[in-house]
Amino acid sequence: MEDKDFKFDFEKLIVYQKALDFMHEIFKIYKKLPPEYKYTIGSNMVRAGASISNNIAEGSGKKSKKEKSRYYSISFDSTRECISVFNILLNEKLIDKDCYINMRFRGKEITNMLYRLIETLE
């Protein structure tokens, strides 16, 4: 039996969907990086970006509020880690100002949503 419209609970969360969009943009940045940066700062950025949606997904399945909060906090921290990477990329002129502003805006939106989600669990 296959249901194309079946979704896991976390897939319905707007913050999860925004995290996926954020990751899509991270991949665009990663693909444009010179090879000497892909395996250092680029890999770090991809790992941190993937951590956002992965920890939202994993945390949503936890039974206790404390566990959920821990995973959502990891997502929050990973988003902030990405912002630090974007600062480095801008300083090294590896992304332009428009890309930088766009990613900071997306990151702020995600951290705000995660913060509110964490607050509801405390």
Image (spheres, helix red, strand yellow):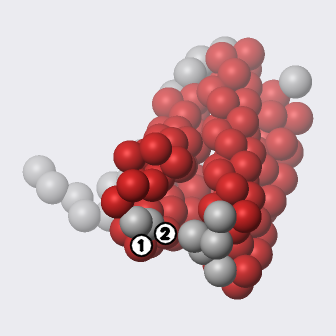
Dot 1 lies on which element?
Answer: helix
Inspect this view and state whether residue 70 appears.
Answer: yes
Kind of residue at badge 1: Lys
* Quadrant of residue 59 within the rendered picture: top right
- Disc 1 and disc 2 in contact, CB within 8 angstroms: yes
Residue displayed at 70% across by 84% down: 98
Residue under pointer 2: 29
The answer to whether residue 41 is left or right of residue 104 is left
Extreme-bottom residue of the structure: 98
Q: Residue 113 appears at what percent x and percent y?
A: 78, 52
| Quadrant where the C terminus is found in the figure | top right
Inspect this view and state whether residue 102 appears.
Answer: no
Disc 1 crowd rating (10 Å Cα; few below 14, some 14-19, many 20+) is few
* Quadrant of residue 94 within the rendered picture: bottom right
Q: Which of 61 and 44 is in front in this view?
A: 44
Disc 2 crowd rating (10 Å Cα; few below 14, some 14-19, many 20+) is some
Q: Which of 19 and 40 is in front in this view?
A: 40
Residue 32 numbered tag: 1
Kind of residue at badge 2: Ile
Q: Residue 92 appears at what percent x and percent y?
A: 65, 64
Residue 67 numbered tag: none
Tell me how far mark 1 sits from mark 2, CA to CA: 5 Å
Q: Residue 64 appears at what percent x and percent y?
A: 66, 15
